[in-house]
Amino acid sequence: RINRVCVVNMLSKVMRAATSAHDWDFVQYETVEAAQDSLARAANEPNVVVTLDNTLTSRGGVLTGTQAIRWLRGIHFKGVIVSASGDADVGAEHLRLGATLAWGKPLPKTDTLRAELEACFPATPQQPSDFAGRGPTQESKQCGPPP
């Protein structure tokens, strides 16, 4: 629970720093199983960000973050999957399975989070990015479909 609160707090800072990202909704679930219906309904929405750790069983869940990523990719989830694990090997495994980004713990600085998310939501002529106005930093990871 504490890690979820930290992630939401950091993403709230990112939202406030973005020029037009002012209407984000943060929805939290205790387990992967509790989130599955909502995530399945949002599978075709590219502007959805899912953050998860690997150990998600403390609140009675069965699925791990690794299993959740496999499931999300299995339903062709089009949003961004962010692994937020304190274990670098878990982060690497999550990336291999299709996570878009991997953040260690402690979480990166707000500017880094913002730059990495900005790279995941490029502006188009029809729809400007919520992060318009600043380019990615050198610390940014490349976003895109899993290899």
Image (tube, rainbow, N blue to C red):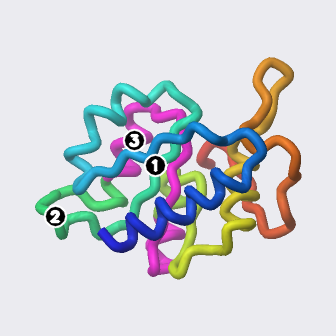
Residue type at the position of mark 1: Val
Residue lying at 28% horizontally and 43% vertically, measured from the top left: 35
The residue beneath circle 2 is: 59
8 with respect to 46 (left or right)? left
Q: Are marks 1 and 2 in contact (CB under 8 Å)?
A: no
Marks 2, 3: nearer the viewer: 2
Query: Could you tell me which secondary element the residue under label 1 belongs to?
Result: strand
Q: Marks 1 and 2, Cα distance to the nearest angstrom?
A: 18 Å
Q: Quadrant of residue 115?
A: bottom right
Q: Of the numbered discs in the image, which one, if any, rests on residue 50?
A: 1
Crowdedness near tag 3: few (<14), some (14–19) or many (≥20) residues, C-alpha within 10 Å: many
Q: Marks 2 and 3, Cα distance to the nearest angstrom?
A: 20 Å
The residue beneath circle 3 is: 72
Residue type at the position of mark 3: Leu
Residue 27: x and y, percent?
37, 45
Residue type at the position of mark 2: Arg
Residue lying at 64% horizontally and 51% vertically, measured from the top left: 15
Query: Could you tell me which secondary element the residue under label 2 belongs to?
Result: loop
Q: Marks 3 and 1, Cα distance to the nearest angstrom?
A: 10 Å
Query: Could you tell me which secondary element the residue under label 3 belongs to?
Result: helix
Crowdedness near tag 2: few (<14), some (14–19) or many (≥20) residues, C-alpha within 10 Å: few
Q: Are marks 3 and 1 in contact (CB under 8 Å)?
A: yes
Q: Are marks 2 and 3 in contact (CB under 8 Å)?
A: no
Q: Of the numbered discs in the image, which one, if any, rests on residue 38?
A: none
Residue 49: x and y, percent?
52, 45
Q: Report the quarter where the N terminus lies.
A: bottom left
140 with respect to 39 (left or right)? right
> Which residues make up the magenta segment?
68-93
Residue 9: x and y, percent?
50, 64
Q: Nearer the viewer, residue 90 or 114?
A: 114
